[in-house]
Amino acid sequence: MREPTADTPAIEALDLVRTYRTHTGVLRRRPISVEAVRGISFEVRPGELFGLLGPNGAGKTTTIKMLITLLLPTSGTARVMGYDVVRETTAVRQRIGYVFGGDRGLYDRVSGVDNLRYFAELYGVEPSEQKRRIAALLELVGLTGREHEKVEGYSRGMRQRLHIARGLLHDPEVIFMDEPSIGLDPVGARELRQTVRSLVDAGKTVLLTTHYMFEADALCDRIAVINAGRIVALGTGANLKDAIADRTIVEIETFGVTDEAVDRLRQDSDVGAVNMEERDQSQILLVQSDRGAHITQRLLSLLGDTRIGKVVAREPTLEDAYVHLIATTGDDEAHAARAASVQ
Amino acid sequence: MSAERTLRLVWFVTWFNVRMLLASEFFILTTFISPLIFATLAFFLFQSGGGTAGQTLLYVALGAGMMGVWSTTLFGCGGAIAWQRWEGTLELLVNAPSRYDFILVGQTFGAVVLGFYGIVATLAWGVLLFGMPIQATYPLILPLSLAAAIISLGSLGMLIATTFVLYRHANALGNLLEYPIWLIAGLLVPVATLPIWVRPLSWLLAPTWGMEAIRGAATGPEPPFFAILMCFVLAVVYYAAARVTLVFVLAKARRDATLSLQ
């Protein structure tokens, strides 16, 4: 088996497509197919921290599962450290680690250290290495002292850190992390980001999926924005921001805004995108426009008799760039991907 | 992977699976209590039918013990896969660099070895409560019979487990297989008493020959060499079938994305 050269990309995906086939109905079963990934291509360089950013259902997890050999692509090719993910699965699996977000994927009824011992054996870690390696990883993820407790008593953050330790047991060259910070509290999420950064500093290649913009911005060397199964933008955080650098964001705090009022904003020819965030008592409307702050009065008049709180006009952030990309590529694409093609 | 590494892997997975199973209350009930209930029922049934001779009681006790072994095999092999699917660990095991068939071997034998406790328990139960004499006709052959039965049941368990990897509702099949096999494999009544058309089916089943090997060594009249041989033959056939099935199952699971479904 050939070894990858220094020029070999750590990860390369070319026109990856994945279609899920399922059915609806009980008595009259109708086959349907859903295109989760629709022709994705990208490369990740060795030692790079690459982010796949997109909303829920965009195709991030499906892409990762194809790259880690859990799913077969419907078409297209992908390689990890030069090895084909369809045909050379063992070579790929020996070189990768992966961490999925969420509560699942651990043996709850035994201790954290027993989980790690078990997976160390499955991942082929030399017996003479196991003890030292497990101790080092427990230290890295901050579980030293809690390792002999049963996992069922672990907090969400502790479980996530144990997931990371498991994924690193065999010292993989490439690490895939699928929404690793989901459900973590802010302190836990910050610690996780530090851990991820330290992995890249140690020379690992990391592919991270997230739908948190700030997380991608804080961590990733490059970001691919994925929506409805396609990459809609790829570049550094600064590149992505440049796409809407000439825009102004008007933040309007409202109380009880109606869908009709928001639609009136969206239909205005000078409005690029409207995003709404729900707060406890209020809604924050984030309106993008290339007309500067002058459009503010018109926006307020379009909202009619909606109760208005604070209004702020500001420069766009990476999150705004993301919202813009998702909004402008979203509805039609998503509809096309999910439309059941009844056979 | 070297032979030493493979043996270590299988041993480690066996040990880990034993620990996981012993942490399950349902498994403990199935493995440790059920055989005693089966044995008690069987003893009273045979006593009321007039079969009170020592060798008959031993025959009954071994059958009841084997019923427990079969239940444990089904739960420990198939049920464990269903549980791993629910926990989200099945994907990790299938996708580990180690060969998944070796992992399955370890998981299966962990369950079957624990299941053989059932035989020991029912024998002790018979001695303590029913005054059953415990004297094997061929005591030197008995360990070989037990080993042959463990290996053949383990291989059958592995074959069953491969279907559980693919189908998330295979647990229903597992439950369905419990009682009919007790009957068809001659654990309750001799295979010779079953209709002729059922017997070929009995001969394909590991519990039939495992039971015959153990009963033959314990109660005679002949040394059970043929039954022991059949255990090993079936073990090889089951293992080969499981390997072939597993290649198909794993390819299909990657194609259909079924491993993470609960």
Image (spheres, rainbow, N blue to C red):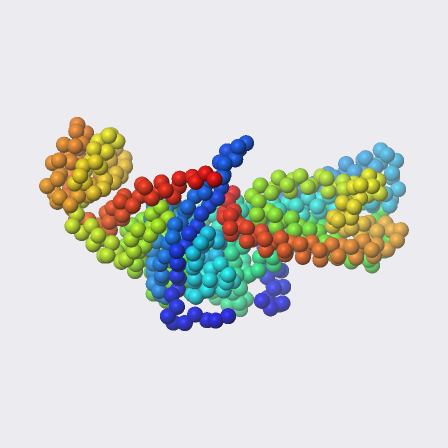
Total numbered labels placed on residues in the image: 0
Q: Residue at x 25, y 40 (%)?
A: A275
Quadrant, the N terminus of chain B: bottom right
| Residue A277 x %, y % | 26, 39
| Residue B142 x %, y % | 80, 55
Q: Is residue A5 above or below residue A123?
A: below
Q: Quadrant of residue B238?
A: bottom right
- Confirm whether residue B29 shows in the render: no
- In the rendered structure, the answer to whether residue B210 lies left or right of residue A206 reads right
Q: Is residue B1 above or below residue B226?
A: below
Q: Out of A133 and B176, give the one closest to the viewer.
A: B176
Q: Residue at x 31, y 43 (%)?
A: A330
| Residue B90 x %, y % | 53, 51
Q: Out of A337 and B235, give the one closest to the viewer.
A: A337
Q: Residue at x 24, y 54 (%)?
A: A240
- Confirm whether residue A124 shows in the render: yes
User: What is the residue that sits farthest to the top in this orientation?
Assistant: A305
- In the rendered structure, the answer to whether residue A269 lies left or right of residue A235 reads left
Q: Is residue B208 above or below residue A222?
A: above
User: What is the residue that sits farthest to the left in this orientation?
Assistant: A294
- In the rendered structure, the answer to whether residue B4 lies left or right of residue A253 reads right
Q: Out of B123 and B184, give the one closest to the viewer.
A: B184
Q: Is residue A143 above or below residue A299?
A: below
Q: Residue at x 39, y 61 (%)?
A: A12
| Residue A75 x %, y % | 44, 54
